[in-house]
Amino acid sequence: MKRIVIDQKIAVCVVFVAALFMSIMDGTIINVALATIQQDFGASSSAINAIVVIYLICIAVVIPASGWLGDRWNTKWVFLTSLGLFTLASLACGLAQNIEQLMLTRAAQGIAAGALMPVGTTMLFRTFPPHQRIQVSRVLIIPTVIAPAVGPVLGGFLVDHLSWHWVFFVNGPIGLAALIFGVIWLQAPAQEEVGAFDWMGFILAGAGFAALLYTLTEGASKGWGSPIILVSAAIGVGALAALVVVELAKAKPMLDLRLFSIPLFRISNLVAIFGSAAFTGILFLMPQFLQNVVGASALESGLTTSPEAIGVVLSSQIVARLYPKVGPRRLTFGGVLGVAVMMGLMSTIDAETNLWLVRALMFGTGVGMAYLFLPIEAAVFAQIPHASTGQASAIFSMQQQLGSALGVAILGSVLALNHSGTTINQNAQSYQYAFLAAAILAFVSACVALFIRDRDAAATMAEHGEHSELSHSIA
């Protein structure tokens, strides 16, 4: 029987979208199950918190090495190995019999997830030429925004009607299907030349990034002046400072920090880190506001925040058409400025606010964020040499993790600092200050976007006719 042949652009999109959806959803779906897991295992609050933190730290340790691994052992097989490990670890999480087993299997999940995103991004941007990247970004934006919206709703349903184990088991069918598809239809690309494994760079990057991520994630809850937070902050800053010195002295470093000398790459990362901080912070804060202040159920909270995903998906179709003619600078600035306005309006809502107004503000936030997501993803690698794509992907993935942690840290700290009482009105005021902080982060992102030069991204700004065929084939 003749074997079915699938275009590599479609094959890469299929496996990457599946893996992206699964890994992003996993980060949000577990949150609604934590209370049930704690009760089931009789675990302490610190042990339950460790389930989340250990996952993030393991991701942070692996990301810096992901570029080298993909280039050394082939992006196809590193990606599929990570996908298989993530799927098996998810099933093992669901089968855990005690909190210690769950921590161990969550660590395995984090190790696998740390390579999935950057190696998958490398495959994607080596498969698609620059002038087609805005179109593929339009497709890939769907799991990026749908997964965080679906996670809490699906998680609540599974916990209420089945058990917490199913928030992990749900990854099984998705991961297995993507793995089989990838083994059959993904082609192994040509190997890239790499130097010896940079152990010093790996240790410094892993320790520094993990410590900094722990500081940002736990600082608000443990207190920024607590000894463990001060020590982790010192380790993170010290290790990353040493990393800069060590890596710049190497001919073939694990993380090529010289890439930041490329203006478009440097500015795009800055825009994304502040924009992601604002967006992730709102996704972290709004459900708490709805449940703690308004008194909404978990399901009602999920349905109220989910319009942001609809806004991104609908708006992204418009952005993809405008990008070739307008370029990233004006699109990103206008969109993120709109996000800042939406978040500023959120600082006026309270317990009596109609939920349809909240949904409208979330929808508007999603509409504006599409003007950041698509242009930045299309432009960030425009001037990166083909051989450096793996390292650039690792750096960009680190920035995404750092931006998300930064948003949660800043908004969580503002919320804690302004929590002056326990009444509904006082709680509402605390959240209002935190929403205002998110608006400031978005405004900073918009201001940085003004430094983008459209001519630097010219390679990604193809005429519409050149990419219409691709749009139809993968959309």
Image (cartoon, helix red, strand yellow):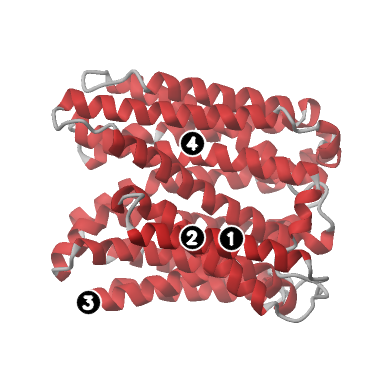
Q: Which of 63 and 316 lies nearest the eye of the viewer?
A: 63
Disc 1, SS? helix
- Left-right relation of 303 to 23: left
Q: Which of 410 and 121 lies nearest the eye of the viewer?
A: 410
Give the alpha-carbon distance from disc 4 to disc 2, as whole Å: 25 Å
Residue 167 in the image: above or below residue 361: below
Q: Amino acid at mark 3?
A: Asn
Label 1, on which residue?
A: 117
Residue depicted at x 59% and y 56%: 398
**Disc 3 packing (10 Å; few <14; some 14–19; many ≥20):** some
Q: Amino acid at mark 2?
A: Ala
Label 2, on which residue?
A: 234
Give the alpha-carbon distance from disc 3 to disc 2, as whole Å: 33 Å
How many numbered discs sit on the rendered protein? Answer: 4
Q: Which mark is residue 98?
A: 3
Q: Quadrant of the C terminus?
A: top right
Q: Quadrant of residue 135?
A: top right
**Disc 1 packing (10 Å; few <14; some 14–19; many ≥20):** many
Q: Which mark is residue 278?
A: 4
Disc 2, SS? helix
- In the rendered image, residue 396, in percent from the top left (x then y), is placed at 64, 53
Q: Quadrant of residue 81?
A: bottom right
- In the rendered image, residue 408, in percent from the top left (x then y), is placed at 41, 44
